[in-house]
Amino acid sequence: MDRELFAAAGDWMAVDPDPDTRAEVEALIAAGDEAGLADRFGDRLTFGTAGLRGEVAAGPNRMNRVVVRQAAGALGRRLPAASLVVIGFDARHKSDVFATDTAEVLAAQGHRAQILPGPLPTPVLAHAVLACGAAAGVMVTASHNPPADNGYKVYWGDGAQIVPPVDAEIEAEILAGGLPPLETGPPADGGGIERVGDQAIAGYVEAIAGALPGPAVEDLVVAYTPLHGVGEATLRRVFVATGLDDPRPTPSQARPDPDFPTVSFPNPEEPGAMDAVMAAADEAGAHLVVANDPDADRLAVAVQTPDGWRALRGDEIGTLLAHHLLSGLSALDRDRWAVATTLVSSSLLSKLAAAAGVTYVETLTGFKWIARAGDASGRRLLFGYEEALGYAVSDVVRDKDGISAAVVFVRLAAALHAEGRSPLDLLDDIYRDHGVHLTGQATLRFADIDIARDKIAGYRADPPAEIAGVAVDRRVDHLSDPPEGMIPADAIVVWLADGTRVAVRPSGTEPKLKTYIEVVVAVADGDLAAAHSVAQSRLDAVAAAMKQRFGGH
């Protein structure tokens, strides 16, 4: 028996204020379940992409009240004395409890904590950090993760998610701080907790309406789902404020429900996740389908085709939003703005930006980089996106925002509808001008994370000379030789002689590699169908070659 493991579990129980997770550990100890304890206490969640995320359960390798208190204490020690921290939370299991724990720990350190009024979208919290002049913000959410998960996302005073070295400093404080006391204690001098009212939501709605002026939209019926998340009430308020008609609901998914009963995985990218809203759209005679993920920071869209509804890929939505926003700029405005996307998203944004005379910035994956893309040059971010359905259509929220992005897309679709055209028609126009840009992914899963790491190490040590019969033209290893302005990251990007780009990066927390492929084919003699066919064939061939190279499933 591993006595240290059982002792660590006992020490944890002594400071755990949650009867559910205490009972979980007590049962494991009573059963002598060493494997179960090792899974929870043999490792710990790392403070990764802007924070923590994992299954709600006991131990340092799960999300629970002890871990949250440790994170809150570490954040508080990293902040200047008597800082203001705004705290938001979604409707997942224990989100409200984790938010209250965070506020109590910060107040006990002498900080001022403001808790937003009830379960709300992540963009409302991100906006509130800026609007309140806070030193930091915390959003308790696991976004589109499975129902068993929750998470802890930290924002800095500039309104964007934290970046290195702040994340590493907070992680070091977590490790140095040890276990928190069972009782948090009262607020220290200067500290306190305020539960704010509707002003936080009203401020967000007003800011979005001010940043996205435009005519009222009529004659476009939109069906909407929040996927059992917290987006619906706020989205409806924003639609009213921006002159859009109320969307048609999806009754089975309209109310927040942490168990997400109608979907196997609450991510609008997953097959079947949008079936209910498409059915609601058919019943309502809708022209457009719009969906948010559970914390409403992502946007999914489906459009009508002769064969039924088709969900647009993230790069397609990004291209359409960018074209719409860039088309609305005057010549005098262009030097003030930048657009940005990541190294694994479509390169088409760079061509749209060049045609419009607007600065283009390419970043590492993650909205913490996109949100800051214009800062170094003093330019404001007109538009930023990542292929995983994340979009920023203004800089009043310095994070992805599925609600404001929905406003812009509905306006775009309404303008096209008035002309008897669809978003797919506009995409075709863009492809005729710049070539078909077809993107796709191959996610390769392995038995454990060490295998995935070995695979990427082998790919780095023995890079391919060709992929799917086409020679590799150039290669960038973002770990050993990052481009200027980027920090090192575990990603390898190659370009083939035919212009195809293949990017590979490992997951930071799961045993898988992600391969992102982009194929670009010029449209010859106006034959768009032929260009699409060639692009699809090339993409399929490259995806098959990458799966063969790495194995996995």
Image (spheres, grey):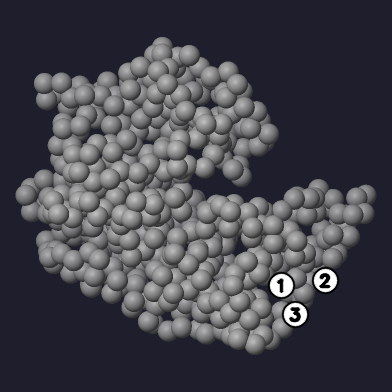
Q: Which of marks 3 and 2 is nearer the N terminus?
A: 2
Q: In this view, does 267 lie above or below 182?
A: above
Amino acid of disc 3: Glu
Q: Quadrant of residue 399?
A: bottom left
> What whole-number distance in Å separates the C-alpha atoms at marks 3 and 2?
11 Å
Instruction: Determine which residue is flagged by label 1.
Output: 18
Can residue 142 be seen in this snapshot?
A: no
Crowdedness near tag 2: few (<14), some (14–19) or many (≥20) residues, C-alpha within 10 Å: few
Q: Which residue is drawn at 40% across and 18% down?
A: 473
Q: Earlier in the sequence, mark 1 or mark 3?
A: 1
> What whole-number distance in Å separates the C-alpha atoms at marks 2 and 1?
11 Å
Secondary structure found at label 1: loop
Which quarter of the rendering shows the C terminus?
A: top right
Q: Where is residue 502 in the image (x, y as percent from the top left)?
A: 43, 27
Instruction: Determine which residue is flagged by label 3.
Output: 183
Q: Please identify, in this view, whether the residue under mark 2 or under mark 1 is nearer the observer.
A: 2
Give the side of residue 514 with respect to residue 275, left or right.
right
> What whole-number distance in Å separates the C-alpha atoms at marks 1 and 3?
12 Å
Q: Position of residue 34 (x, y in %)?
A: 85, 50
Give the side of residue 393 with respect to residue 122, left or right.
left
Q: Residue at x 63, y 54 (%)?
A: 168
Amino acid of disc 2: Ala
Q: Residue furthest front?
A: 377
Q: Where is residue 124 in the image (x, y as percent from the top left)?
A: 40, 69
Q: Residue at x 86, y 54 (%)?
A: 5
Give the side of residue 490 with respect to residue 495, left or right.
right
Secondary structure found at label 2: helix
Q: Quadrant of residue 102?
A: bottom right
Amino acid of disc 1: Asp
Residue 14: which numbered mark, if any? 2
Can residue 46 be seen in this snapshot?
A: yes
